[in-house]
Amino acid sequence: MLNRVQILEAIRQQIGRSTETGGRFALQIVRIRGLRDIHLRFGWGDGEQAENDARLLIEQSLRPVDRVFRSGDESFALLLPDMRNQNHALLAATGLVKAFEQSLNNATSPWFERPIIGMVFFPEHGTDADQLCRRAEMALDEAERRGEQDDHQHHNGARD
């Protein structure tokens, strides 16, 4: 079940709080490629377990105040309130990537997948929930494109 309404409402509430306090927050959209493949290859039960494992890894890498929502087949939306500056959000993203260096879904077959992250900040990248979500998705798409280019260049370099 997707939580788009819940995500947008949480962002609206955070916009209200941040506007009152003059604070900033980050919104990250995180894609874990391979989750859908587990559903297809091993069945719904193992797929759900892998999603739960992924969510747990995400939650363990974050602060208690941060919130995680499932936002798609292979993606999660992360709401990170009270980010003093972009470096704090980048540290959170680095911690998230490190969390996924361990194996996921040992119940079926271990797999490793690097999360892809699109990140935006309030108020710099938008002042309403829908705009922030769209821009975070665009940042995710761009990060995915850059990652594929890096992988392609790396593989080409390895063959030469």
Image (cartoon, helix red, strand yellow):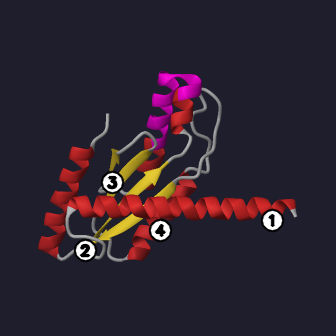
Above or below — where is 84 with respect to 10? below
State the image coordinates of residue 19 (x, y, percent, origin top left).
15, 72
Between residues 141 and 8, which one lies in front from this camera angle? Answer: 141
- Sequence-wise first label, 1 or 2: 2
Of badges 4 and 1, the one in the foreground is 1
Left or right? Give the position of 104 relative to 131.
Answer: right
Residue picked out by circle 2? 123
Alpha carbons under labels 1 and 3: distance apart = 42 Å
Residue picked out by circle 3? 64
Q: Residue at x 52, y 26 (%)?
A: 46
Q: In which quarter of the image is residue 104?
A: top right
Are dots 1 and 3 in contact, CB under 8 Å? no
Q: Can the viewer see residue 44 in this picture? A: yes
Q: Which amino acid does label 2 sit on?
A: Pro
Instruction: Locate the N terminus by quadrant.
Output: top left
Alpha carbons under labels 3 and 2: distance apart = 23 Å
Dot 1 crowding, Cα within 10 Å, few <14, some 14–19, many 20+: few
Q: What residue type is labelled 3?
A: Pro
Residue picked out by circle 4? 91
Residue picked out by circle 1? 157
Q: Which amino acid does label 1 sit on?
A: Gly
Alpha carbons under labels 3 and 4: distance apart = 15 Å
Q: Can the viewer see residue 80 in this picture? A: no
Q: Residue at x 52, y 38 (%)?
A: 35
> Residue 111 lies in magenta, yes or no?
no
Q: Magenta segment range?
A: 40-54
Between residues 29 and 23, which one lies in front from this camera angle? Answer: 29
Provide the secondary structure element on which disc 2 rests: loop
- Sequence-wise first label, 3 or 2: 3
Between residues 121 and 90, which one lies in front from this camera angle? Answer: 121
Q: Which residue is drawn at 18% across and 65% down?
A: 15
State the image coordinates of residue 81 (x, y, percent, origin top left).
28, 64
